[in-house]
Image (cartoon, helix red, strand yellow):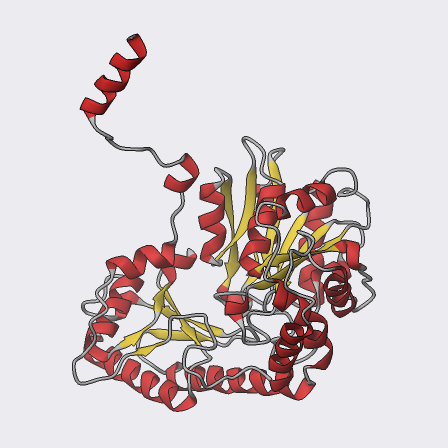
Amino acid sequence: ERMSENVEKDTMKGWGTIKASPRARNTTNKIRDLVDQIELDGHPSKDMIALSIGDPTVFGNLPRDPHVTKALEDALHSGKCDGYPHSAGYELSRKAVAEAMSLDGVQYDAHDILLTSGCSGAIDISFEIFNVPGCNILVPAPGFSLYHTLADAKDMEMRHYNLLHDQKWEADIDQMKALIDDNTVAIVVNNPSNPCGSVYTREHLKEIVNVAEEFHVPIICDEIYAHMIFDGDFVAIASVAENVPVLTLGGLAKRYLVPGWRMGWISIHDPVDAFKNEVREGLVKLSQHILGPNSLVQGALPAILKSTPQSFYDGVVDYIKENAHTVFNMLKGAHGLTPIMPHGAMYIMVQIETSKFKDIEDDRDFSQKLITEESVFCLPGLVFNAPNFVRIVTTVPKEKMVVAMQRVLDFVEKHKKE
């Protein structure tokens, strides 16, 4: 009788508000929040040119290589990729990634590779494996906004080490050291960088590795833009980490121009066996949360990695490099703007000297007014912890880039302080 009274009483109350979990409530995405707040109606007589989206497929000017298409078709028609793979990925697919990653003296095998749902899935798992109560994690500033999203959701304290724009965006090593304490669980490195487009030398990577070795802190290195560099050879951080454990994150999204295929991976480099007893097993356990990435793309992965010709990679990089030079050359003399020439990835950062403008308060104000008056959308640096910068994506069609940069020049002339 008492139970029926409670049911009736609760029914009379109605549903009320059902609480979301703390992790859900703590999840924020800086880019999404900005887009929701900014007014995206551009000038009525000018078509919108979005230089804001880090998706190389948006304009259709950079198609995937035919070998990639054929690899997926073959996987589909084989009939062998329709079931559940192991949560860490098909053995043959992991072996293919291991072979592709084994460069510059670093050797991997299949058990060192974990396939993930995109590189963002790799970041998520890599953060989670080190997530303990009261921990902190070092992340770059400027840096990819997803690091902030995941750390906040997981209640991990973020400590930002500065990248120095006047030193090719190299990390401030002394500041990095000062941030580390007994609760620091990992140093996050992004090379090549989003949003900076920087590419670290072997010497600078060794400086970062030396900090990790001194304080016995593992490295998480986001290398989703690996090999997308304008000059020289790409250096993987694992190749200089002789006495430091590293989780290297990669995927197909950027270099192969298929971000929607959601194929990423974690490569485990552990020369000191620090990951042997718990981290390796823990990574596999975490992969069981979603049972791994798409089986068809996994099945296509060996052929994608082995068959895609070097000419395809070179063509994409040359295209991005030419656009980066266009932006740099057109803006280098612009009033109040200082473009910083990138050396890789698909972005260029431009510094805004607000004191030289009569009515520009900050990077967000610059971006909003540029949209309204010129229909050009650049992301303000605030979403990357880079105040008074804007990020320009360099994968757009070349003719649109020229038009967009001319509009930026017109804009700064209108707003400059006389």
Q: Which residue is depicted at the point 63% across and 42% down? A: 129
Residue found farthest to the bottom: 399
Q: Which residue is depicted at the point 24% across and 30% down? A: 15
Instruction: State whether residue 402 is above or below residue 115.
Output: below
Whether residue 128 appears in this view of the structure is yes
Nearer-the-camera pick, 302 or 366? 302
Q: Quadrant of residue 38?
A: bottom left
Q: Quadrant of residue 177?
A: top right
Residue found farthest to the top: 1
Instruction: State whether residue 412 is above or below residue 184.
Output: below
Left or right placement of residue 220 versus residue 379 in this view: right
Whether residue 386 appears in this view of the structure is no
Residue found farthest to the left: 44
Q: Which residue is depicted at the point 21% across and 28% down? A: 14
Q: Which residue is depicted at the point 40% across and 41% down? A: 24
Nearer-the-camera pick, 36 or 68? 68
Nearer-the-camera pick, 364 or 375? 375
In percent of width and height, residue 53 lies at 40, 70
Q: Quadrant of residue 263?
A: bottom right
Left or right placement of residue 351 versus residue 310 in this view: left
Q: How many marks?
A: 0
Q: Quadrant of the N terminus?
A: top left
In percent of width and height, residue 172 lies at 57, 55
Q: Quadrant of the C terminus?
A: bottom left
In percent of width and height, residue 396 lies at 42, 82
Left or right placement of residue 131 versus residue 86 in this view: left
In percent of width and height, residue 238 lies at 74, 59
